Amino acid sequence: MRQIDELYLKWPFYGSRRLCEELQQRGYWVNRKRVQRLMRQMGLRAMYPKPRTSQPEKGHTIYPYRLRDLSITRPNQVWASDICYIPMAKGFMDLTVIMDWYSRRVLAWRVSNTPETEPCLAAMDEALTRYGGPDIFNTDQGAQYTSEGFTVRLKAHAITISMDGKGRWVDNVLVERLWRSVKYEDVYLRAYETPGAVRMGLARY
């Protein structure tokens, strides 16, 4: 998984077939099915235009994409959230961030050992408390963001909900810059041993 993560940062447009080939060239004799399973576990997907980039839970409401042709000209106009895989010496954690789309500033973040809604809510509540609220909040269609608990919280603050849809893969390129910096400038260099060490290290970074 650590090798897949590194390869994905280098070539985010690689799918499971190409990643499997690269791993085999590095001496990891894995098959494509295993690579696909690990990519799902890590929340990774090749970045190219395709429908349904993230899977919502059955019955969850999917909201329209609100950023098309929108000129983003100031802070607190649009916020976004995403989740990435953080490798440790043994195991991994999930990092959730809330980012201001105009300034690219990380407004709040949480680390957790399960990809659930609660860390996303906690990060959002911190950002709302510290910075007020945006006009629009944009996410992918992952189950954490389509959950009623998350969307109700946004509606309570009169925030317009926007979700990436078909053909909006390019939006994720923006936050990928953050993931690349976090991993190459901190996580990969330190090889954190424990969840506590991950939290302390990321707070310092």
Image: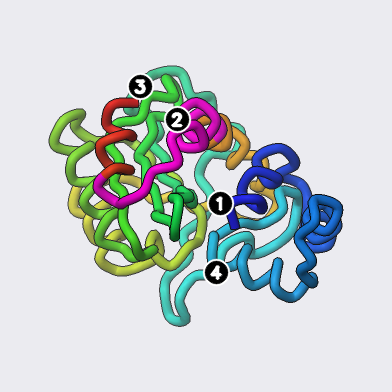
- Give the prevailing secondary structure in the magenta stretch: helix
Q: Is residue 61 above or below residue 14?
A: below
Discs 3/4, front:
4
Q: Is residue 42 shown left or right of residue 132?
A: right
On the image, the x and y values in percent for residue 144 come to: 38, 63
Q: Residue at x 38, y 29 (%)?
A: 100
Q: Secondary structure at mark 3?
A: loop
Residue 181, above or below 124: above
The Cα atoms of the two marked residues, 1 and 4, are separated by 11 Å
Marker disc for residue 75: 3
Mark 4 closeness class: few <14, some 14–19, many ≥20 residues within 10 Å = few
Q: Secondary structure at mark 2?
A: helix
Name the residue carrying label 4: 55
Q: Please tell me how crowded label 1 is: few (under 14), some (14-19), or many (20+) other residues with Cα within 10 Å.
A: many
Q: Is residue 145 magenta?
A: no
Whichever of callouts 3 and 2 sits on the residue coming sooner in the sequence is 3
Q: CA distance from mark 4 to mark 2?
A: 30 Å
The residues tagged by marks 3 and 4 sit, at their Cα atoms, a distance apart of: 29 Å
Disc 3 to disc 1: CB gap under 8 Å: no
On the image, the x and y values in percent for residue 111 come to 31, 49
Q: Name the amino acid type tagged 4.
A: Gln
- Residue sticking out furthest to the bottom: 58
Q: Which residues are magenta?
A: 180-196
Residue underneath mark 2: 186
Q: Which amino acid is tagged 1?
A: Asp
Q: Are marks 1 and 4 in contact (CB under 8 Å)?
A: no
Q: Residue at x 25, y 65 (%)?
A: 149
